[in-house]
């Protein structure tokens, strides 16, 4: 357990070790007005940038709060050991050549272990990282250029990649950056630990994470819980969807990338937002900085062009955001403000009849913002400042500001192309509480993400994630009959059935159950392809013939009562994710599994509300609700069945390697569900 990170990230004294990089750290601190002590350490130099050099850690006038160690990897370990013994607050380990380079340097892994041991309980960042920038206090353990300015409050952006951090620091979007932090190899201190530390700073409003691999599920859970308690949202850009990205992640950080669908489910459970691109991350952080999570997915859009209105409408099709219809009481004020030739709708094309008229624009914008939308957007691309006059565009900005202040509504101005909003305009809008969005797609991504966080926060805090160590024993596969009996003990409905050893015993079992029946060969992995399943057998003779026909592949037989025609077939599965542990999958089942790729994933433990929401988001949910006049399925029974499967997995979490129930046959409403087939692989 390391000590608090407070001294490290908010230092009053900084020690710098090394030559060129150490000098750059001193330069950046001086430029940004750091008022604390700076102590260079160098074996031969007398001064660095006008400051006296000390020869060693022992010679320092005190234990530094933060240290930048910019020396070779071997010497880094010695200095870290000395700093820890001296009681220093923490250190940035700049050197590379540790675990990230293990394929090139055979001793990389051993050196990283030695570094962590040398640090003891003193926090360290890296190795293989640039460090951090604290623009609240002007403290920069950062050996390079950056594009940031001092702020009094703002967001924190954290990443494993130093280059991504440099890029973000150069943004010209009006986003107030309080902290930029890098974690490198996360040898001891991970991104989530850093995020928890910056959340505690009252000047930080929101946190953005660029994640290559989760450092610790426990830290991630703690981050999600603390963000919710402090009402400071966290949003992530989690890379690793592609096979190439996953390979790069392992080679760069040696962190587990995990399954991408699991990552999304995990983050959603914890109330942590997820975006797809760096621009989306920055635009979402602007919204969260000013207004926090949104109250709903309902948004409005206004523009002075039908083309822009169409772009907004089309961009919303793939999003969860909703352009809710106008309320009746909004229509007349909008008609009076905009005239008879304007179609009153959402998205709204207000034409150019009120262009340049601040009072009339304010009236129209106010009427729209009184509709109770979570976010009100106005599309506005600005002319080039070097060639054109932007006076009327500035007028529109002030009309949006006026309407937002008059109504208390959350508002944003959207430039359809990011380069069409000047930085000074973005800064002015932020100062007045209006979000300057650069890009239509980015604006809607921000709205969706902020609303998703709000929706999760509105629900009770989820139970802690299931944490269990997998058993080491050899994996075995249960027979279908054994698997069904195990699941039935947890409440999963299965067909009436009997297992028999020989073909001659099958007809008696069938007669006892009542015809028609299903006959399956046991011990066969893919029964249909092997001819080891026969449906709707009407007599003893048919059962015996079928049993003899599959005798060459079957090690026994399962005779079951035939189930009626289902409304829909679903699959419920479980797998052991390397990061999140056992997780549950629900999706379209039967022959549609591969064709539709229609599934949802649930982290464990789960509950019936979460299961119901997951089912409702599937494409196959249309069948369950009675598609095109067809009968509705028994969704309540399906929810209970999935909960039973989850109960089995949770109860046997240490030994379950794989669960596959396919299909679960969903019958008409009131008739229940039946698990027609099941596979379970367990560790002994």
Image (spheres, rainbow, N blue to C red):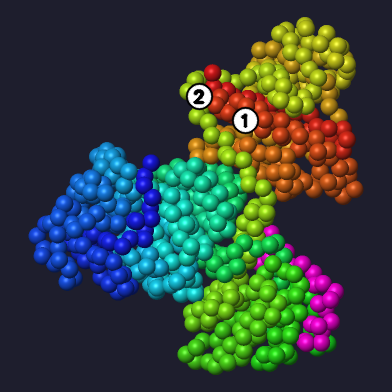
> Which one is in front, 80 or 172?
80
Residue 215, can we see it? yes
- Locate residue 30, reporting x and y percent: 27, 72
Q: Which mark is residue 650?
A: 1
Q: Is residue 136 left or right of residue 205?
A: left
- What's the residue at 20%, 52% (across, down)? 72
Q: CA distance from mark 2 to mark 1?
A: 14 Å
Q: Residue furthest front?
A: 62
Callout 2 environment at 10 Å: few (<14), some (14 to 19), or many (20+)? Answer: some
| Image quadrant containing the N terminus | top left
- What's the residue at 67%, 15% (across, down)? 554
Quick check: 461 above or below 567?
A: below
Q: Is residue 592 left or right of residue 33?
A: right
Residue 326 is one of the magenta-drawn residues: yes
- Locate residue 666, reporting x and y percent: 80, 35
- Locate residue 265, reporting x and y percent: 60, 46
In this figure, which residue is indicated by the disc labeled 2? 471
């Amino acid at each position: 357990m390391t000590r608090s990170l407070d001294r490290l990230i908010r230092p009053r004294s900084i020690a710098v070790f090394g030559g060129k990089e150490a000098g750059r750290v001193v330069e950046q601190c001086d430029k940004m007005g750091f008022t604390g002590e700076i102590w260079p350490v160098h074996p031969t130099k007398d001064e660095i940038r006008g400051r006296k050099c000390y020869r060693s850690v022992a010679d320092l006038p005190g234990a530094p709060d933060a240290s930048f160690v910019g020396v070779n990897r071997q010497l880094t370990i010695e200095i870290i050991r000395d700093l820890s013994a001296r009681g220093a607050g923490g250190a940035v380990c700049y050197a590379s050549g540790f675990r990230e380079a293990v394929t090139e340097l055979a001793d990389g892994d051993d050196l990283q272990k030695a570094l962590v041991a040398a640090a003891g309980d003193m926090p360290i960042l890296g190795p293989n990282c640039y460090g951090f920038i604290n623009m609240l206090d002007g403290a920069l353990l950062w050996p390079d250029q950056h594009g940031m300015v001092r702020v009094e409050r703002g967001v924190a952006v954290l990443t494993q990649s130093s280059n991504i951090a440099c890029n973000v620091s150069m943004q010209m979007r009006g986003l107030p950056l309080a902290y930029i932090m890098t974690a490198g190899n996360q040898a001891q201190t991970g991104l989530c630990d850093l995020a928890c530390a910056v959340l505690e700073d009252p000047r930080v409003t929101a946190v953005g994470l660029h994640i290559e691999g989760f450092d610790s599920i426990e830290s991630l859970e703690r981050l999600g819980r603390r963000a919710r308690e402090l009402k400071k949202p966290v949003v992530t850009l989690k890379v690793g969807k592609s096979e190439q990205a996953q390979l790069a992640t392992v080679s760069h950080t040696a962190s587990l990338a995990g399954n991408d669908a699991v990552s999304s489910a995990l983050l959603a459970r914890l109330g942590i937002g997820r975006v797809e691109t760096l621009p989306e991350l920055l635009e979402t952080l602007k919204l969260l900085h000013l207004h926090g999570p949104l109250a709903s997915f309902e948004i409005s859009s206004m523009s002075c062009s039908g083309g822009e209105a169409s772009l907004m409408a089309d961009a919303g099709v793939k999003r969860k955001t909703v352009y809710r219809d106008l309320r009746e009481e909004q229509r007349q004020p909008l008609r009076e403000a905009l005239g008879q030739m304007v179609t009153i709708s959402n998205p709204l094309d207000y034409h150019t009849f009120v262009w340049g008229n601040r009072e009339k624009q304010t009236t129209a914008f106010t009427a729209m913002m009184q509709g109770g939308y979570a976010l009100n957007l106005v599309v506005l691309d600005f002319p080039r400042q070097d060639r054109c006059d932007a006076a009327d565009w500035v007028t529109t900005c002030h009309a949006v500001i006026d309407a937002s202040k008059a109504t208390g509504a959350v508002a944003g101005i959207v430039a359809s192309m990011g380069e069409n909003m000047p930085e000074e305009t973005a800064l002015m809008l932020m100062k007045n509480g209006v979000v300057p969005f650069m890009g239509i797609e980015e604006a809607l991504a921000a709205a969706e993400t902020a609303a998703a966080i709000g929706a999760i926060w509105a629900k009770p805090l989820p139970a802690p994630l299931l944490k269990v160590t997998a058993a080491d024993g050899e994996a075995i596969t249960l027979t279908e009959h054994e698997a069904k009996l195990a699941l039935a003990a947890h409440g999963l409905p299965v067909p009436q059935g009997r297992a028999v050893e020989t073909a001659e015993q099958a007809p008696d079992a069938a007669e006892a159950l009542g015809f028609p029946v299903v006959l399956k060969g046991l011990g066969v992995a893919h029964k249909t392809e092997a001819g080891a399943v026969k449906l709707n057998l009407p007599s003893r003779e048919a059962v015996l013939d079928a049993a003899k026909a599959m005798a060459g592949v079957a090690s026994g037989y399962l005779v079951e009562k035939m189930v009626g025609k289902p409304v829909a077939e679903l699959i419920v599965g479980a797998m052991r994710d390397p990061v999140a542990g056992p997780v549950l999958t629900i999706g379209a089942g039967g022959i549609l599994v591969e064709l539709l790729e229609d599934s949802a994933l649930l982290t464990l433990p789960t509950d019936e509300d979460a299961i119901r929401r997951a089912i409702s988001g599937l494409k196959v949910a249309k069948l369950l609700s009675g598609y095109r006049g067809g009968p509705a399925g028994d969704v309540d029974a399906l929810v209970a069945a999935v909960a039973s499967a989850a109960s089995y997995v949770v109860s046997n979490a240490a030994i379950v390697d794989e669960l596959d129930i396919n299909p679960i046959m969903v019958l008409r409403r009131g008739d229940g569900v039946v698990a027609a087939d099941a596979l379970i692989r367990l560790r002994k």
